[in-house]
Image (cartoon, grey):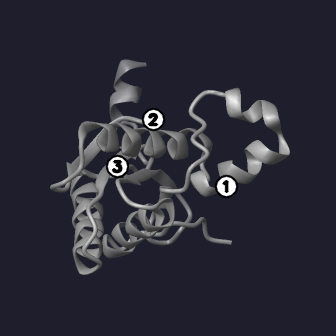
Amino acid sequence: MAALLMATPVSAQTLTAEQADSIVKGCAAHARAKSQSHAVAVVDTGGQLVAAWRMDGNGFGSMEFSLEKARAVAAWGFPTSGMVDAVKGTPGFADAPFVVAVPGGIPVFSADGRTRLGGVGASGEAPADDAACASAGIAAAGLKSERAR
C-alpha cells in the first residue's frame, strides 16, 4: 500500500509561489499607474497565504483586510462583490464564516479557467479600485478571474 501511495502522481493543480508573486506585481503596477496604494494578499484554495505585499502608505489594517477578502474568496469561490448581494438576499449569510461583503476579493482560476487555484484580496482604496487591482494582478499572471463556461 505504501508503495502504491508513493507511486501515485499528484495531479491537482495548485497556485505556485511564482504565480502569486506575479499577481502581486501585476496589482502593484496597476496601482502605480493610477497613483493608488493597496495591500494585496494571495492565498491558495485552503486560505493559506502564498504572497502578500503592502504598498507604501497602507497600515496593518489594510493588510489584514486584504487577507480576509482573499480567504473569503478561497472559502466561497466567488468574488466578495457577490457577497454583498448574497447578504442582502439571505440575511443569515452575513453571519457565516469567511463572509466579507465588500468588493476587493477575486477568485483565481488556472489559465484555462477550469481549476480554481485560490483568491486575491486587495484593500486600501475604494472597494471598486481594490477589485480592479486584484483583477489586474490575476490577468498579469496569465490567469483567469472567472471559471470557464
**What amino acid type should be assigned to the residue bearing mark 3?**
Val
In this rendering, is residue 20 above or below 43?
below
**Residue 83 visible in the picture:** yes
Q: Which quadrant of the rendered structure holds the C terminus? A: bottom right
Q: Is residue 9 visible?
A: no
Q: Secondary structure at mark 2?
A: loop
Calculate the distance from the C-alpha at mark 2 to the C-alpha at mark 1: 20 Å
Residue pushed farthest bottom? Answer: 33
Per the image, the residue denoted by label 2 is: 46
Q: Residue 123 location, x and y as percent?
A: 38, 52
Decide which of tag 1 and tag 3 comes sooner along the chain: 3
Measured Cα–Cα span from mark 3 to mark 2: 11 Å
Give the amino acid at mark 1. Answer: Gly
In front of the other: 4 or 137: 137
Residue located farthest toward the top when viewing the structure as drawn: 1
Seen at 24% across and 64% down, the residue is: 22
Q: Which residue is mark 3?
A: 42
Pick whichever, 85 or 117, lies toward us: 85
* Nearer to us in this view, 146 or 100: 100
Which image quadrant: the N terminus?
Answer: top left
Residue 139: % across, % down: 39, 74
Q: Secondary structure at mark 1?
A: helix
Q: Are marks 1 and 3 in contact (CB under 8 Å)?
A: no
- Residue 73 at what x, y percent from top left? 53, 46
Location of residue 78 with respect to 139 vertically, above or below: above
Foreground: disc 3 or disc 2 = 3
Q: CA distance from mark 1 to mark 3?
A: 19 Å
Neighbour tally class for label 2: few under 14, some 14-19, many 20 plus, Cα within 10 Å:
few
- Which three-letter amino acid code belongs to the residue tagged 2? Gly
Which residue matches tag 1? 82
Which residue is depicted at the point 26% across and 62% down? 37
